[in-house]
Image: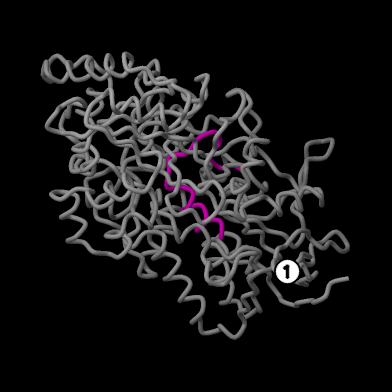
Amino acid sequence: MADHTYQTDILIVGAGIAGIIAAYELLDSGRKVTIIDRDSAENFGGLAKWAFGGMLFVDTKHQRRAGIQDSFEIARDDWFSVADFMDGEVWGPRWAEQYLQMSDAHGYQWLRKHDIKFFPVINWPERGYLKRGNSLPRFHMLWGTGLELVKQFGNRLKNHPKKANLTLIFDHRVRSFVVENNRVVGVEGNREQTGEAFSVRADVTIAATGGINGSLEKVRANWYEPWGEPPKVILNGAHKYAVGDLHEATESINGQVVHLDRQWNYVAGIRHYAPRKEDHGLSIVPGKSQLWLNYEGRRFGPMPLINPYDTRYLLKRICEQPVKYSWQLLNYKIALKEFAISGSEHNESMRDKKFLKFVLKTLFVGNKKLVDKIADRCEDFVVADNLPALVDKMNALTGENHVKLAYIKRDAQVYDDQIDRGVTFHNDEQLRRILQIRKYRGDRARTCKFQKILDPKAGPLIAIRSFVLSRKSMGGIETDLQSRVLSTPDVHDNQSAIDGLYAIGEAAGFGGGNMHGHGSLEGTFLGGCVMTARVAAASIQDQEL
């Protein structure tokens, strides 16, 4: 028996950005809304607080102002190329199309009406390497990063005209759903600190607890089988409480959970110098001018690895290596221009909305403060004045002596020789890509103009040990186009919505259980949280967006 029972009209399990926006929309209905979360009140907002805050939108005012002629048709072709949906998949592809159709009016424009601003220049990730990716720039960067989004909607929620109907409960871990007469009527769980049992009775319950990637055990258990065994070391870049509790609870009531092996993990993770959780990692935004090397110090591919084209391709190539981590070889000059770490924590000028400071750093000063800080405090950042000394330090760090001086020296010299021959005779795919990248103004200011690695005037040399970083679950609780949780298929392959239960955000695979398929165009994770939350709220209120 529960030690304490709460009562509400609408229960949202999870106080991340999806839960916050759903609650904000639902308070308009006049019903009592309760958000319950395992974390403490100071961490209200979840992982979005730490996110850089890019969102993919299609055919927006920002794009048109920049001369980018985008459309649903172009975006759909790009999305489905990267997603590579399998025959028979239903709800993921439908949600992908719904997201693209709604992204401008119900994502971009709605956020703008709520005083959310975007940086004037649109970013252009995931362009596609060996297959089609983003044909056009669509990555709208939040001015103020994800932290601003949490602040804005957190404040709007707490100051809502009907805020008396809002209850926030923290330090409570939900473990199961309560079902009566084939309808979900609430949840049960335990208080995080004391272990006391509790229950919540509700007319409607929304799962908004994130994915599974905060549990490295579950990441490994659901590793994509064609890539073999998971890496020996995986760093954690997800929320520490995104461990799949409600995925398991959904399965226990005959709800459908799909494609947990489809994960969006990054390949340039380094250990956090001040970890807030076990195996805490940071995600480097890989530069374009560095050389990406395998564990032995060799360039590998067969196409050389380079950002920002295809994250999944990079991960696949690294996982094909006998030892599944990599190195990034660069120098101090390249680092000043190109080194960056994703998230609000290490992008202060964006986070604090200091436009002149941002421009000054980007165009003139570079990332000196960040580079020096990471070089001084992160064990995965190796610095030396010459190549033999660098290789000695790389091998001392790993204790394996895998890195061979001859490999690094050969590949770096061949690359530098290509640069010396001039643009007309560049016969290296990475140099050809850099030429193309620098034609877009959003990249030109952050990309060196054919900088040699071994240039003595550009030193010291830097090697960054890069691990796979667990990040986002692209699979999850399967939902229909109203964000209602679906049952497992019967013998006739029919499904029905489970009464009283919705799933949003990463818990729902950002829509439909897996709207990304096997890969993402980026910007659709945070955007997916916003969109699924709004769709669920409209459905519960029996409205149309």
Residue 193 placement: quadrant: bottom right
Report the residue at 19% width, 28% height from top.
435
Front one among 352 and 487:
352
Kindly identify which residue carries mark 1: 191
Is residue 529 rendered magenta in the image? yes
Report the residue at 50% width, 40% height from top.
469
Name the amino acid, label 1: Arg
Secondary structure beneath disc 1?
strand
Report the residue at 81% width, 48% height from top.
254
Res. 214 visible in picture? yes
Front one among 427 and 490:
427
Front one among 36 and 101:
36
Tell whether 196 sits left or right of 38.
right
Tell me residue 536's x, y (percent).
Answer: 60, 61
Tell me residue 69's x, y (percent).
Answer: 28, 43
What crowding class fits label 1: few (fewer than 14 Cα within 10 Å), some (14-19), or many (20 or more)?
some
Front one among 191 and 496:
191
Res. 439 visible in picture? no
Residue stretch in magenta: 514-533
Is residue 472 rendered magenta in the image? no
